[in-house]
Amino acid sequence: MDEERQERREEEEEEETGRGDEDRTPSRRTEEEEDEEEIEEMKAHPKDKARRELIGGHTPISASSSFTSSPFLGRGRGQGGEEDGEEDEVRVAIVTIEDESCPSEPFGTAHLEMANQITRIEDGGGKKEEEEEEEEANSDEREEEEESTEVTSPSLHLQSQMKRKLDHGPDGRPFPSGKKHCKGNGYLSPSALVQATPTTFGDLRLANGHSAQRRRVTSGPPPSGLQDWLHTFQAWSGPERLLALDELIDRCETSQVKHMMQVIEPQFQRDFISLLPKELALYVLTFLAPKDLLQAAQTCRYWRILAEDNLLWREKCREEGVSEYASSRRRKCARPGAAVSPWKSAYIRQHRIENNWRKGDTREPMVLKGHDDHVITCLQFSGDLIVSGSDDNTLKVWSAITGKCLRTLTGHTGGVWCSQMAVATVISGSTDRTLRVWDAESGECVHTLYGHTSTVRCMHLHGNRVVSGSRDTTLRVWDVSTGRCEHVLTGHVAAVRCVQYDGRRVVSGGYDYMVKVWDPETEVCLHTLQGHTNRVYSLQFDGAFVVSGSLDTSIRVWDAETGGCVHTLTGHQSLTSGMELRDNILVSGNADSTVRVWDVRTGQCLHTLQGPNKHQSAVTCLQFCRGLVLSSSDDGTVKLWDLRTGAWLRDVVALQSRGSGGVVWRIRASDTRLVCAAGSRNGTEETKLLVLDFDLDDKKKETE
């Protein structure tokens, strides 16, 4: 019995050993057999060969590749191979992703270009190769079924790793929803490798990162026939669906339409600014007007950060003509720790000042009373100092901030008829035939300039030189710092009434109807401009054109180099008492109560500032300011006009005695202030200065 049992055990062991050998036999493959099979596969699939050549002879792992050669499958194919000391050869292609190849992406596009090339090779195989692949797939179906348990898990893992590599940055963090990738030539987006282009609203929700199951209306069970109705809708063509939707919307109640809007609208709302790189977002914002940029800053916190960019506001300030000086001044006044762009602050300040000029406010002007009942004949101001000259033989220095009279400049023995000012240096001309140079800060008379033999009626200061014109028919060129008379210009045969000096040429107009152009260094009269038939009362000179206004009602434009008359501007009916010339635009004020705007290059009258709000008496003075025209008149008002359109904007000043004797004699304006010299000839209005400050809000903040 024992021998029989032993024989049975030996037979069973031999049978088991034989079965093990049979199981291991298929896994033993010689290298020659493997090479032959590889050659046959390359012949049967030429596209695989091209793909190997594309990436150095290795088979790339893609969405359509077989996973049988994956390292994840090497362990599950047969343990017998390890027992026999033989291992399956596995070739894996590693595609390196270069960093920073796209400015807005954390990874390059070299791998995507390679994927596109592989895709083109696969697409170019034709239907014949697709049929061969199908037959091969059918022949291997049984083997795949046997290995399904082992293959499924690694393949899904590999697909997940590929998608994560495409949709995440190098740090593993996902890109924000809706982030647009930079696209170049041969670009294949990650979404194209994973899913198709959205064709329905449900696909769009999935593409936008929303759940496939959106919140449904829970008013009860679905109506019967709903699925049939949906199938019918899907069977219709595009135009038929649109027609059906139009009919459906017409039959919906308001609450139902509101529900549709709540579902649909969020899918088409995109904060594209936040999704763009900062440089591109700022570039988009440069196309906004400053007003729109201020509104955009209120959208959200990130938009506000972008809208505070200092370089962005610097460009906006340059477009609007806001100077760097204004910006630097504002930067000094900014509070410590403030996160506001200095250029933005400068723009807001200028915008507020512009608005104050055009629309005004309820503040009353500051009143500076002085000179008793005398006439204020000349007015200057620089910085925070105002200087007024009067026929009471004095000049007064005022503070534009407090309105107090700081000092009275005495020394002239006759009425003061003209003055000029630069910083704190004041030059005055009087009927006592002298000029005096004053220090406005100390009130000291620095120099008394003797030479004229009659009233000094006009003067013009440029740099360190002042040119004076007198009723003695001469002009004199003085050095302000030394008080010395450097040149005397003679040639007029009557009183010199007006003078202009640009540092190179002197232009003068007189009661002899003549306009003369001088070289002050040689004291030679270069041109005598003849044409007026009456006294010349006003002049403007910009280096190229000389413009003269006369009692003969005409205005003449002359070429300063040749002395020829370029244009004769007609339209006024009386004496042109004041003119302003800037950038080839001339504004003239006339005793006929009108103001005209001209183009000196063409001689065309662009605007006549009149209408129901025009002045009711002679225009006494003019000023240019911020694209605006200011005009004062004997009717006791100061009017503001738009230079571009010629429209009346408002009355900046209106005296209580206007129309009954009140007069505004002189006005001077800067970007932020207007100073008016007012009074009357019959005692109805006391002599005073009116100061209007259009930057008070900024001053208050600085004081606080």
Image (cartoon, rainbow, N blue to C red):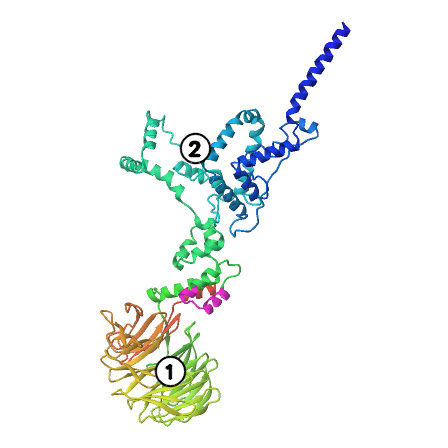
In screen coordinates, is 190 left or right of 542?
Answer: right
**Does the magenta-highlighted stretch encompass residue 364?**
no
For residue 389, the mark is: 1
Q: Say which quarter of the image contains residue 636.
A: bottom left
Please name whichever residue, 673 or 485, is drawn nearer the observer in this view of the structure: 485
Q: Considering only order in the chain, which callout, 2 or 1, is on the residue closer to the N terminus?
A: 2
Where is residue 61? Give x, y as percent.
Answer: 56, 38
Magenta part of the protein: which range? Answer: 317-333
Badge 2 amino acid: Gln
Between the residue at mark 1 and the residue at mark 2, the CA separation in whole angstroms equals 85 Å
**In the orientation shown, which residue stands out farthest toward the top?**
1
Q: Is label 1 or label 2 in front?
A: 2
Residue found at x 25% / y 84%? 551
Is 320 magenta? The answer is yes
Q: Which one is nearer the viewer's eye here, 507 or 245?
A: 245
Q: Is residue 132 visible?
A: yes
Residue that badge 2 annotates? 213
